[in-house]
Image: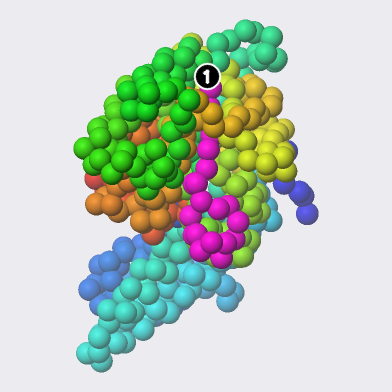
């Protein structure tokens, strides 16, 4: 059996497809497969609304009971054999994709059985609500499996290279400061089910202006510039941020921080991994063999993919320098390893050559001290963590969430990595995610069209 293609190789393309670009809730950043089985309308109320899967022998039996559908163009294929085999998937991931295809076929059969049960219960005048929900859930899971089976459409090399050695050409720098919130370990560690990684990108000439503005706030409230805005103490109102229990002064400080976020020119990026769902939906079943199984590695790669979309869409172009807040020596080395792996091997969606063209070849590390843009990354990481921990509910926005949302990278419809914030996995809260994207300026309709 042939192995997977080289990581930098683009998938085979067969010309443009004139049909509309449909997407699925399970993998919103990737276009849905173009040549999967047709979606067959089942208009009889005894059957349900739309069946999202191939017509199987079970469906044909259900349809014969209620007169909903007849023979379709795929019927001859479906009569052969006990299983349902979707069409061949595009080249580019033979092992993992085949498993996902098999899973989607089994889910399609399960959906057919569930719809048959729904019809029989209806004829017996018995409650059908729970079975109807099962039908919907099976259809959603089948769509997720189909998306995992067929993969991406855009080539990994879509971010074109401009020169063979980026450091030779003295491009100005864009600086990305990265900090985290939560624990990247297993769900059981400290009971946290969310891990957030946040990045603040600003041009190098804007860093000094930020430092001056932050120092002015420190001088006004603390009469010294030897202060670092530290999110946990600010959020809990501890230490110097108690302000002698003066609530008016505390609110004035919070307004100053809001103004600092609004007036500083930067672009925000963030990845929040819902660890329990990531483990149950991707790691344990081995859904995607090319997706890292480590939470931190997933977050780094996804953040860099979105940062690259931002860099490649700017003019004039800039070379990026990435800086992490230093943890301890082993953790810093691990971050450096994952960063180097992205530059060497690329990701499932972006070629290594693209990363190398836009990013400096090594990470830098810094500790929190004085006024530094890393403070903004610290605040945004915590706000993202709190937002996702609250299941992205609009009414429970963190303190500075609205200010940071105005700074999130957003291009076009925000799909395919063109939006700076990614919650993963997110198919069960997709409507809330889309609402936030629209709020940030993404050109998507009022309904979930993934």
Residue under the image location 52 percent in, 43 percent down = 180
| Position in image of residue 337 (x %, y %) | 72, 38
Instruction: Tell me the quarter of the picture where residue 445 sits.
Output: top left
Along the line of sight, which residue is nearer the eye, 183 or 46? 183
**Quadrant including the N terminus:** bottom right
| Position in image of residue 185 (x %, y %) | 60, 56
What residue did someone put label 1 on?
174
Residue under the image location 51 percent in, 51 percent down = 182
Image-based side of 422 in relation to 100, left or right: left
Is 320 drawn above or below residue 169 in the view shown? below
In what element is the residue under mark 1? strand
Part of the protein shown in magenta: 175-196
Image-based side of 114 in relation to 203, left or right: left
Residue under the image location 34 percent in, 42 percent down = 242
Along the line of sight, which residue is nearer the eye, 291 or 251? 251
**Color scheme of the displayed model:** rainbow
């Amino acid at each position: 059996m042939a192995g997977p293609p080289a990581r930098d190789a683009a998938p085979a393309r067969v010309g443009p497809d004139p049909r509309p670009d449909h997407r699925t809730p399970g993998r919103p950043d990737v276009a849905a497969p173009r040549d999967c089985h047709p979606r067959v309308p089942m208009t009889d109320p005894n059957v349900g609304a739309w069946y999202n899967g191939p017509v199987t022998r079970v469906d044909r039996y259900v349809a014969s009971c209620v007169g909903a559908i007849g023979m379709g163009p795929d019927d001859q294929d479906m009569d052969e054999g006990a299983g349902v085999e979707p069409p061949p998937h595009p080249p580019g991931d033979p092992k993992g994709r085949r498993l996902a295809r098999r899973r989607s076929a089994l889910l399609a059969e399960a959906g057919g059985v569930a719809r048959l049960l729904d019809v029989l219960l209806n004829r017996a005048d018995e409650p059908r609500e729970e079975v109807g929900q099962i039908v919907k859930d099976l259809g959603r899971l089948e769509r997720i499996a189909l998306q995992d089976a067929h993969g991406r459409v855009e080539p990994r090399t879509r971010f074109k290279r401009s020169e063979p050695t980026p450091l030779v050409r003295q491009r100005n720098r864009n600086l990305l400061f990265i900090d985290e919130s939560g624990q990247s370990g297993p769900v059981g560690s400290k009971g946290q089910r969310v891990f957030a990684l946040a990045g603040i990108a600003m041009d190098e000439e804007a860093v000094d202006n930020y430092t001056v503005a932050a120092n002015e706030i420190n001088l006004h409230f603390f009469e010294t510039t030897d202060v670092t805005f530290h999110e946990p103490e600010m959020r809990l109102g501890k230490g110097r941020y108690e302000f002698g229990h003066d609530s008016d002064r505390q609110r004035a400080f919070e307004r100053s921080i809001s103004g600092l976020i609004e007036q500083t020119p930067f672009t925000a990026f963030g990845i929040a991994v819902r660890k329990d769902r990531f483990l149950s939906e991707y790691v344990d079943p081995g859904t995607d063999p090319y997706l890292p199984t480590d939470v931190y590695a997933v977050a780094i790669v996804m953040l860099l993919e979105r940062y690259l979309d931002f860099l490649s869409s700017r003019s004039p172009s800039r070379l990026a320098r990435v800086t992490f807040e230093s943890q301890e020596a082993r953790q810093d080395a691990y971050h450096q390893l994952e960063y180097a792996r992205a530059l060497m091997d690329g990701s499932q969606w972006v070629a290594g050559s693209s990363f190398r063209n836009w990013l400096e070849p090594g990470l830098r590390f810094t500790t929190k001290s004085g006024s530094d843009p890393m403070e903004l990354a610290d605040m945004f990481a915590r706000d993202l963590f709190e937002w996702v921990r609250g299941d992205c509910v609009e009414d429970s926005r963190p303190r500075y969430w609205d200010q940071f949302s105005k700074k999130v990278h957003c291009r076009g419809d925000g799909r395919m990595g063109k939006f700076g914030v990614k919650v993963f996995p997110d198919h069960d809260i997709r409507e809330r995610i889309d609402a936030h994207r629209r709020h940030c300026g993404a050109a998507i309709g009022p309904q979930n069209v993934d």
